[in-house]
Amino acid sequence: MSLPTSPYCTIGPFFPGEFAAGCCDLTSFQGRQARGQHILLSGRVFEEGNRPIINAIVEIWQPDANGVFRHPLDPRSVDADPGFFGWGRARTDAEGRYSFRTVIPGSYVTEEGAPRCPHLNLMLLAIGLTRRLVTTVFFADDPATVSDPVLDCVSDPELRARMFAIHDKISNGAAVLPGYRFDIVTRGEAETPFFLD
């Protein structure tokens, strides 16, 4: 007995081509401008074989320039920068590119007393992924000297290096902004370290 071939179907989810204006700009909230060093964080999202992932969703959440999260679980949330939203969403274009306008996150100390390196959290959703991918993006002038409880979970120096944004000058129309690049590889030899959530 032979069975008919099932039609080919790419696993979803499928996302809209555009988001509301301003979703990728964390530096302005309720008519106020965020304090701190404004930067452009951008990069590309790849799958194995250096193929760009089109229409992936990249979300970030981070503390403000003083290391305070705009979230009630942060005991210092009442001191959060009123001009900084703390969360953003972008989609990748035909070349797998994404970008956010944000600020350099401030460092802080956890309730257990562990110092945290300036960082932001990043989540990726894409067609064909069966679960979201989560990683942490660190900012430091000398990554080799950084001690952070999350980063210390990754012992391989080559993998640790993949978790740092690279300082770069990025053109944004007529202006050149201080910027950082963080490319994401979903699988393969140069895969970005991801955490289970």
Image (cartoon, helix red, strand yellow):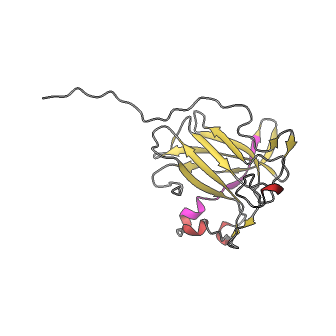
- Residue 31 placement, left or right of 100: right
Residue shown at 58%/55% (left/top)? 135
User: 77 or 159, which is in the foreground?
Assistant: 77
- Could you tell me residue 22's position as x and y percent? 74, 35
Q: Which residues are magenta?
A: 159-171
- Could you tell me residue 104's position as x and y percent? 76, 55
Q: Is residue 10 magenta?
A: no
The N terminus appears in which quarter of the rendering?
Answer: top left
Residue shown at 68%/72% (left/top)? 114
- Could you tell me residue 143's position as x and y percent? 66, 66
Q: How many marks?
A: 0
Q: Quadrant of residue 72?
A: bottom right
- Could you tell me residue 87's position as x and y percent? 70, 46
User: 111 or 89, which is in the foreground?
Assistant: 111
User: 4 or 49, which is in the foreground?
Assistant: 4
User: 115 or 47, which is in the foreground?
Assistant: 115
- Residue 55 placement, left or right of 113: left
- Residue 53 placement, left or right of 146: left
User: Image height check: is 130 above or below 159?
Assistant: above
